[in-house]
Amino acid sequence: MNRWSICILVAALSLAGIGHAEETAQPEKTRPEDDKVEAAIKKATDYLLSQQKDDGSIQDAKNETAMTSLAIMALSATGHLTTDQTKEGKALRKALEFVLRDDRQEENGYFGSRDGSRMYGHGIVSLMLAELLGMGVDEDHDRRIRKRLDKAIQLILWAEDRKQADSGHHGGWRYTPDTMDSDLSVTIWQLLALRSAKNAGLDVPKKAIDAAIGYLKRSYYSQRDTEGKPINMKSACGYQPGGSPSFASGAAGLLALQACGEYEAPEVKGSAEWLKELKLDYNTAMFFYGTYYYAQGMYQYSGEYAEHAKRITESILLPKQQEDGSWQAPGGYEQAAGKVYSTSMAILSLSVQYHYLPIYQR
């Protein structure tokens, strides 16, 4: 029985890491808006398929390995499998074969060099492989995924461990494996990859997660009391320790802390409160990047926060979908990253509650 079959039966809780559910929850329509969301996702899926190249990659700008991996996650998050005998299943198989090619990964396990995506891309590819481990078309396919993933995870661990324990950057990651500093935007991709890999059965030392927790809490923007607890209970994480929060960094910090199992940490509550009061629109800096974490992080926090984030995400994204099914960022880095990037991130943001990928389990 492969890992996907196991997930259907016992729903591995990748972010929570607190046990197993009886069965994987399936999407249920509870509101009229759900039909609109499903229609938007269907159009977006067709757009991603239209961007697949002859070599299997799904990309329209640059960073082809990372973008293909994002597209694979987006397709998988809405219920499509590599084993499906559909156009979506065929596209997934072809895209995964592209990522698994020998020329995509360095000997040391690094995915971020060949396509120029650096550690951002490495974390994205690693997370995708961890999520799809056990979902291959056969046992040989899964062995190939595990081989690539194992090398990728070892690189992530090496890059974290080489930073000096007494530095403020210990526990995080940055642009390349050998850098000695860290930032939150790169760190979260590596952390999600580690959490997913751990739940897929790979060896991820506890000290790696503990070090990451320390870095995340140092990034929370607040003075501390004599016991080390944050004084400001309505704040969030900054790009680096000492920096004020933005939408993207605050949302990333919320999700990352929960990914580390810090569900009751004051920094989690403070981040959720801060994000709930934030006024968002399509021109918010790094909107797609932040919304992916926002949708996931608030969903994990549950209750009124999850419902609030769901309403906000849908109310902004749905009217901005283009006729061809894509989304286009209004400017800056995200616009330069291309429509495959923004469309994949939009699908992932809208499909969090569908539970098809293990990482979306509460």
Image: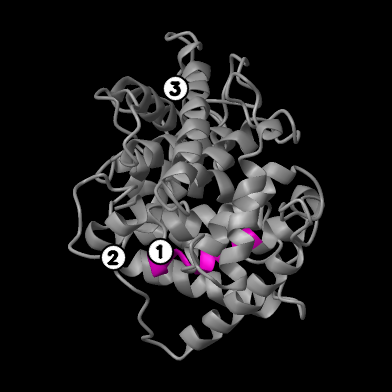
Relative depth, front residue between 284 and 341: 341
- Is residue 47 rendered to the left or right of residue 148? right
Instruction: Please give left or right for residue 284 compared with residue 75 in the image.
Output: right
Pointer 3 residue: 171
* Majority secondary structure in the magenta region: helix
Q: Nearer the viewer, mark 1 or mark 3?
A: 1
Q: Nearer the viewer, residue 90 or 210?
A: 90
Q: Position of residue 250 (x, y in %)?
A: 50, 46
Q: Quadrant of residue 301?
A: bottom left
In this rendering, the label closer to the viewer, 2 or 3: 2
Given contact means CB atoms under 8 Å apart, are the residues at marks 2 and 1 in contact?
A: yes
By what rule are the colours in the image chosen? one colour
What is the number of callouts on the image? 3
Q: The residue under label 2 is which amino acid type?
A: Thr
Amino acid marked by disc 3: Gly
Say which residue appears at 28% left-offset and 40% top-offset. 261
Q: Which residues are the magenta region?
A: 344-356
Q: Quadrant of residue 228?
A: top left
Q: Amino acid at mark 1?
A: Tyr
State whether residue 225 is above or below residue 334: above
Does label 2 or label 1 sit earlier along the sequence? 2
Residue 350 lies in the magenta stretch: yes
Classify mark 3: helix, strand or loop: loop
How many residues crowd mark 1 within 10 Å: few (<14), some (14–19), many (20+)?
many
Report x, y in % for residue 54: 79, 56
Relative horizontal placement of residue 16, taking residue 272 as reference (left or right): left
Q: Position of residue 360 (x, y in %)?
A: 39, 57
**Would residue 348 be visible to someone looking at this image?**
no
Q: Residue at x 61, y 40 (%)?
A: 100
Rounded to the nearest whole Å, what is the CA distance between mark 2 and mark 1?
8 Å
Is 18 left, or right, of 216 in this rendering?
left
